[in-house]
Image (tube, helix red, strand yellow):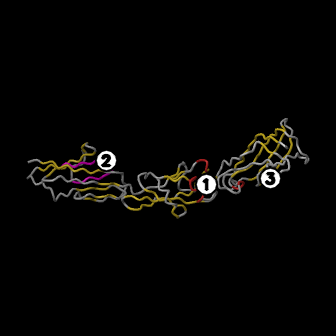
């Protein structure tokens, strides 16, 4: 009597580990990181033929009692007993195949083998491909707070944990069915605020009271006390012109924001009206020095 025995194994993820044999008599979990060989014991069945199928398609090159798992999908083993009717049960086992090794990546084309410098405005984001698992992110060897459990880490969300223009080391752990698994790499990242936009007022009133007596840039960056320092800016120089193009004043302020008090280059008060300005400065002088320039106009009132 001919009897067909179907055996289904469901593979949940790719694997890349050293080959290891497993038998079919209980469910098992594979945590290897290379191809795994699964074996149906021949001592149980004699005088039988074996047919393997992958996603219901026969595997033409495999006719023995074992197979090496190298792809995600559904594997079926059909055992045809040509002798006595000795098989009375179907053997079914579920194999959960975990991707054991993983790396931390960064949204940049730069090599992760070197120190990477990025601008905060370019939104540096670290991540892994392990989206189904809880993550534990580490900064300089210390675990970040528990709310950072996703498979991505947005650097802008942890500005209170890092320093601009400093090397920081990032890595991650995941928790899967294999336990706690550490990433194979660290990412060394330096972050700077490169664009360093200056916010300029459009009105000032140099009338001697306690308010708005000077014209100067401001930076409303959240939680930054010394706005001049946030971008590592320096070499500030501001020129002021009347609306007819006459040069009124030059302010060279070095590392400090330039400030104009409404006086011309002879020290006399200028009249009310519209004045044009041009500011030149350098940003990121310790890492990626770059000269920037802004221009615009401001209304001067004295009442």
Query: Which is more toward the observer, 169 or 131?
Result: 131
Report which quarter residue 95 is drawn in: bottom left
Dominant secondary structure (helix, strand or loop) of the stretch shown in magenta: strand
Residue found farthest to the bottom: 142
Query: Could you give the CA–CA distance between mark 3 and mark 1, rounded to whole angstroms?
Result: 26 Å
Helix, strand or loop at label 1? It is strand
Residue 253 got which mark? 3
Q: Is residue 48 magenta?
A: no
**Residue 162 drawn at (x, y percent):** 60, 59
**Percent x, y of residue 201:** 75, 44
**Number of the label disc, if any, that sits on residue 191:** 1
Local crowd at mark 3 within 10 Å, few (<14), some, or many (≥20)?
some
Q: Name the foreground residue: 116 vs 163.
A: 163
Sequence-earlier tag: 2 or 1: 2
**Left or right: where 42 falls relative to 273:** left
Measured as percent of width and height from the top left, residue 57 is found at 25, 42
Give the residues in magenta: 65-78
User: Closer to the camera, 38 or 256?
Assistant: 256
Give the structural element (helix, strand or loop) at label 2: loop
Label 2: few (<14), some or many (≥20) within 10 Å? Answer: some
Lower position in the chain sequence, tag 3 or tag 2: 2
Residue named by callout 2: 73
Residue in front for this viewpoint, 263 or 47? 263
- Judged from the image, the secondary structure of the residue bearing numbered disc 3 is strand
Residue 72 covered by magenta stretch: yes
Precedes in sequence: disc 3 or disc 1: 1
Q: CA distance from mark 3 to mark 2?
A: 67 Å
- Quarter of the figure with residue 139: bottom right
């Amino acid at each position: 009597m001919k009897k067909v025995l179907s055996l289904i194994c469901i593979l949940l993820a790719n694997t890349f580990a050293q080959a290891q044999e497993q038998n079919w008599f209980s469910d098992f979990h594979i945590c290897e990181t290379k191809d795994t060989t699964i074996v149906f014991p021949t001592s149980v069945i004699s005088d039988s033929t074996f047919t393997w199928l992958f996603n219901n398609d026969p595997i033409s090159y495999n006719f023995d009692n074992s197979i090496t798992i190298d792809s995600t999908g559904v594997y079926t083993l059909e055992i045809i007993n040509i002798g006595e009717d000795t098989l009375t049960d179907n053997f079914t086992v579920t194999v959960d195949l975990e991707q054991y090794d993983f790396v931390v990546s960064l949204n940049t084309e730069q090599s992760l083998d070197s120190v990477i410098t990025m601008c905060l405005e370019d939104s540096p984001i670290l991540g892994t491909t392990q989206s189904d698992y809880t993550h534990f992110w580490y900064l300089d060897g210390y675990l970040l707070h528990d709310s950072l459990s996703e498979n991505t880490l947005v650097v802008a969300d942890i500005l209170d944990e890092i320093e601009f223009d400093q090397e920081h080391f990032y890595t991650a752990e995941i928790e899967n069915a294999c336990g706690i698994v550490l990433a194979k790499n660290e990412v060394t990242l330096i972050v700077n605020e490169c664009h360093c936009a200056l916010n300029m007022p459009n009105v000032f009133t140099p009338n001697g009271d306690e308010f708005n007596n000077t014209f100067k840039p401001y930076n409303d960056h959240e939680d930054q006390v010394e706005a001049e320092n946030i971008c590592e800016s320096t070499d500030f120089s501001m020129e002021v012109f009347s609306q007819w193009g006459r040069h009124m004043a030059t302010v060279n302020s070095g590392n400090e924001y330039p400030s104009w008090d409404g006086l011309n280059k002879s020290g006399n008060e200028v009249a009310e009206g519209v004045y044009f300005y041009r500011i030149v400065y350098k940003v990121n002088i310790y890492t990626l020095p770059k000269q920037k320039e802004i221009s615009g106009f401001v209304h001067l009132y004295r009442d």
